[in-house]
Image (cartoon, coloured by chain):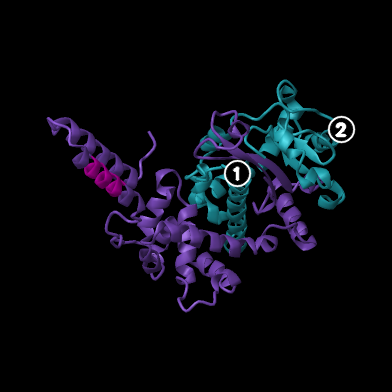
Amino acid sequence: MPRRNYHACVRRTYLIHMLLRSMLDAPDDIDAEALTAQLIQDLQILNKITNTRYLRARNRLPKAGNLHLAFTYAQNPSDYIRFTNMLRISPHVFHVLLSLIEDHQVFFNNSNVPQTPIEIQLAVTLFRMGRFGNAASLEDIARNCGISEGSVEKFTNRCFDAIEALHDTFVRLLTTEEKLQEKQWMVHHLGFDGLWKEGWIMYDGTIVVLYSKPGLNGDAYYTRKGNYGLNAQVCLCSVRMVIILISL
Amino acid sequence: MTGSAHDAAAFEHTVAVKYPDWFFEGEEFAWGDSAYPVNERTVSIHKKPASLLPENALFDKTASRIRVRSEHCMGALKGRFQSLRGLRINTMSNQDHIAACRWITIAVILHNLVIDVEGAQSGEHFMNGHTRDDELNDRGQPDEAIRIMGNSKRERLITEIVAIKGL
């Protein structure tokens, strides 16, 4: 059953109240004037319920995130592994990534209210990318990070914009020197030189599973394994395992 | 491509197939698993019964040692960014489909960035998060190949490995 919103619940409760009242409190003689007055009053109340925007007090949601722990872990080399488990990349890579994206214009606006610090936005994004199942739900991410659900979406979108701008720097064909290096590694790995070293590229197809059946053309996403997903064709270097092409 | 696409069918739409001369130089070729077509630019391992021949078995064994690295790569990618194991995007419109593709692209960019900064071994920590069994569970056994043509490159590779290693 779909979830009813609060307005619908209140309206329904009032209608039941009206019904019970007229059943239990039925007058012996019908007084048209009193009944009309009663009906007008009911209609006014129902109208008021519909037109009142907020039926409940709007209190601040209590928030207690634990994202700051990641930055505490980053202070101490023995806790680096905890940082990595939380944000999926090591503190060193985190700082490199931060320095690469922090100048992107998406993090600047002409407002008097400054944006949340970029490292927090990036941490939320990485935290989100590292979870699946219930832990990946917007509500759980928001609660863990101590921010609102809307912020989670906003931070992720901003960071995705900034990271996407790095696409051509990191996902590209190799230069001639890199190819030579790759082939040398192949010779080293195989133990002999020859035609085999020319095969330094690998193709692989993989399924990125979706958590539910898509609403649009759902059947087209159905895979052999009975789940729904996207087929990604990946082309990678045999030795360094860098992905040089991705076709979705 | 959507999940119902056959690996070999999805592969036909990649740049590597459409513009091979841009992608490959000289004798270069790529390894695929047995689902991919065999030609001058793509070499895959044998399927039964061809894989039972001793020279083919030797070829397959050596080639599989290279191929297994791609599984490691997938393990590192999906183990690190586990959201790829159950992408929480409601595909209700074309924009949502693009958003899902974007999510995957971002994960790949970050994967490459990590390797550039820390090297390939940095993924080992995450490989337990997405094992070979998980990967098989996601995609199942490889498809049957749609067509096989131009075996000559593979023949040359077999001749070479037999000459070097002996049967």
Q: In screen coordinates, is A108 left or right of B53?
A: left
x then y, percent, for residue A75: 39, 71
> Within 10 Å of the Cα at label 1, are there few (<14), some (14-19), or many (20+) other Cα atoms?
few
Q: In screen coordinates, is B78 left or right of B16?
A: left
- Amino acid type at mark 1: Ser
Co-location on one chain, circles 1 and 2: yes
- Amino acid type at mark 2: Gly
State the SS at label 2.
loop
- The residues tagged by marks 1 and 2 sit, at their Cα atoms, a distance apart of 41 Å
x then y, percent, for residue B100: 58, 47
Quick one: quadrant of the N terminus of chain B? top right
**Up-down relation of residue A82 to residue B14 (above or below):** below
State the SS at label 1.
loop
Q: How many marks?
A: 2
Check disc 1 and report the residue beneath it. Answer: B93
Q: Is residue A201 visible?
A: yes
Colour chain B is painted in? cyan
Q: Residue farthest to the bottom?
A: A112
Callout 1–callout 2 Cβ contact below 8 Å:
no
Check disc 2 and report the residue beneath it. Answer: B150
User: Within the magenta stretch, is there residue A164?
Assistant: no
Disc ID at residue A153: none
Span of residues in magenta: A36-46
Q: In screen coordinates, is A69 left or right of A233?
A: left
* Chain letter for the part of the structure drawn in purple: A
Q: Is residue A89 visible?
A: no
